[in-house]
Image: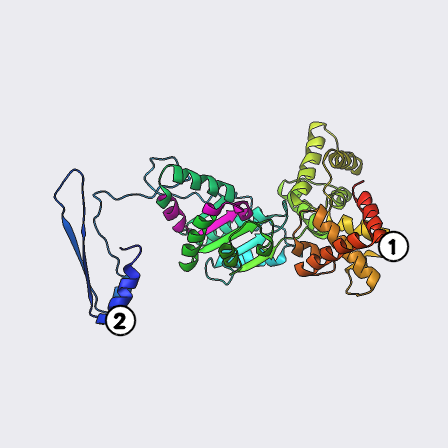
């Protein structure tokens, strides 16, 4: 009664009986031990609309108060305390801002200072792996805890959420699971794309999302793709992801990569020649996680072998690292190979020109970027001439049509593909 129908009853009573209406109902308990059923009557007199709206009802249906189970603690702990599960290193102080992440960082900072009070709800941060989605999402949570210590903040990975949901069904406490998540003030759900194809999990998260959003609570989501490209997700959930702001993280440019490395060695209290940092930043371009990993490997080589950090040592280590790691083809690399093949400067491909040969080269670069990288269509378009995802889709369709109908063009595509995979 209280959870499902009290609001509609209040509205109907106000409409039919006026502001002086009284709500009276009794609940008959049936107990297997005590055969005699005792009615409980609750009078709900109302003097004005605000009292009617705000006064809670409490009915003693059970002799003991039932506590909501916290899925993050050991069963048996009665006090509900939520650990935010945030890494203190993932703060805004340690997040290097650049052109590649300025929109997402600015939106995140605004949310951290006013959770649930901005137009960025939900805030969906998307981008390829290793670009800082988790760092930025957790930085928002850390800022919220600093500004509003009383707020309940929780960071959880989509895979963990899924596991807890399955356990709640097996243990027959799905309601506790729902109630727990519905009491969170700031929910940070990482890798929401992992819900793809999991209909029951999506349905449960849909209800949690609705409850939190309608209650003015903040939702922060991360994904490897924007909502328009997420496959295997319910449309009603995708439409809600679009209610707020979707901000992307791009691969860092050279200056941002240098700044990230400088920040890292400064925090660790280490000095390193600029030429070494430049060498690392030049050769590892796509993934921030790999960039920091290369720096850590270099420091380990220097410390364990008691060698001074020099450009020569950096070259040996980086070359070995790249050789042993399966090279990830980047959009920048694809553009370079395509431009070299068609003998056109890369800045001309990035320009707004509509010359036929330039447009075709741009379309070829988009085609290979979609097939050989994990980048989203929006990311590909933004890096190749500042286009949108619809332009990338059109480019891929055009190239596929030409491959089927033009033998000379098909041979060109085969030659470029061989160069890319060398």
Residue 186 colored magenta?
Answer: yes
Viewer-proximal residue among 89 and 390: 390
Secondary structure under tag 2 reads: helix
Q: Picture coordinates of residue 216 (x, y %)?
A: 42, 59
The extreme top residue here reads 305
Which residue, given by chain and number where applicable, does mark 2 sit on?
15
Kindly indicate whether the residue at mark 2 contacts the one at mark 1 (C-beta within 8 angstroms): no
Residue under numbered circle 1: 343
Asked if residue 254 can be seen in this view, the reply is no
Between disc 1 and disc 2, the foreground one is: 2
Mark sitting earlier along the chain (1/2):
2
Q: Position of residue 12 (x, y in %)?
A: 27, 67
Residue pictured at 21% horizontal, 71% vertical: 17
Q: How is the image coloured?
A: rainbow
Q: Residue at x 74, y 44 (%)?
A: 329
Q: Residue at x 48, y 54 (%)?
A: 219
Q: Quadrant of residue 303?
A: top right
Q: Position of residue 160 (x, y in %)?
A: 48, 40
Which dot marks residue 100? Answer: none
Q: What is the crowding at mark 2: few (fewer than 14 residues within 10 Å), some, or many (at least 20)?
A: few
The residue most toward the left is 36
Q: Is residue 77 left or right of residue 237?
A: left
Magenta-drawn segment = 176-201
Quarter of the rendering occupied by the N terminus: bottom left
Q: Is 172 left or right of 230, judged from the image as shown?
A: left
Inspect this view and state whether residue 251 appears: yes
Q: CA distance from mark 1 to mark 2?
A: 76 Å
Quadrant location of the C terminus in the rendered image: top right
x, y (%) of residue 203? 45, 50
């Amino acid at each position: 009664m209280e959870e499902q129908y009290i609001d509609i009853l209040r509205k109907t009573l106000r409409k039919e009986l006026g502001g002086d209406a009284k709500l009276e109902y009794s609940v008959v308990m049936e107990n297997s031990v005590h055969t005699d059923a005792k009615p409980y009557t609750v009078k709900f007199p109302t003097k004005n609309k605000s009292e009617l709206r705000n006064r809670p009802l409490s009915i003693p249906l059970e002799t003991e108060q039932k506590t909501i189970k916290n899925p993050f603690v050991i069963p048996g702990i009665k006090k509900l305390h939520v650990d935010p599960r945030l890494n203190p290193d993932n703060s805004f102080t340690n997040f290097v801002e650049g052109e590649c992440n300025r929109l997402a960082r600015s939106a995140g900072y605004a949310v951290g200072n006013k959770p649930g009070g901005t137009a960025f709800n939900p805030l969906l941060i998307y981008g390829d792996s290793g670009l800082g989605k988790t760092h930025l999402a957790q930085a928002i949570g850390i800022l919220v805890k600093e500004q509003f210590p009383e707020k309940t903040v929780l960071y959880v990975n989509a895979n963990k959420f899924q596991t807890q949901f399955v356990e709640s069904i097996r243990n027959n406490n799905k309601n506790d699971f729902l109630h727990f998540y519905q009491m969170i003030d700031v929910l940070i759900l990482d890798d929401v794309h992992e819900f793809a194809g999991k209909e029951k999990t999506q349905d449960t998260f849909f209800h949690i999302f609705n409850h939190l959003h309608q209650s003015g609570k903040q939702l922060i989501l991360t994904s490897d793709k924007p909502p328009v490209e997420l496959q295997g997700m319910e449309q009603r959930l995708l439409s809600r992801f679009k209610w707020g702001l979707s901000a992307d993280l791009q691969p860092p440019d050279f200056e941002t990569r240098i700044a990230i490395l400088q920040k890292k060695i400064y925090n660790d209290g280490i000095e390193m020649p600029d030429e070494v940092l430049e060498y690392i930043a030049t050769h590892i371009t796509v993934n921030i996680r790999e960039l920091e990993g290369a720096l850590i490997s270099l420091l380990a080589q220097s410390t364990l072998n008691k060698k001074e950090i020099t450009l020569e040592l950096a070259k040996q280590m980086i070359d070995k690292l790249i050789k042993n790691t399966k090279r990830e083809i980047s959009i920048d690399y694809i553009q370079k190979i395509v431009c070299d093949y068609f003998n056109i400067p890369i800045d001309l491909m990035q320009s707004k020109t509509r010359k036929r040969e330039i447009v075709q080269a741009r379309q070829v670069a988009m085609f290979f970027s979609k097939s050989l990288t994990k980048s989203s269509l929006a990311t590909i378009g933004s890096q190749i001439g500042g286009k949108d995802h619809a332009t990338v889709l059109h480019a891929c369709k055009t190239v596929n049509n030409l491959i089927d109908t033009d033998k000379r063009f098909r041979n060109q595509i085969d030659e470029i593909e061989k160069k890319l995979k060398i």
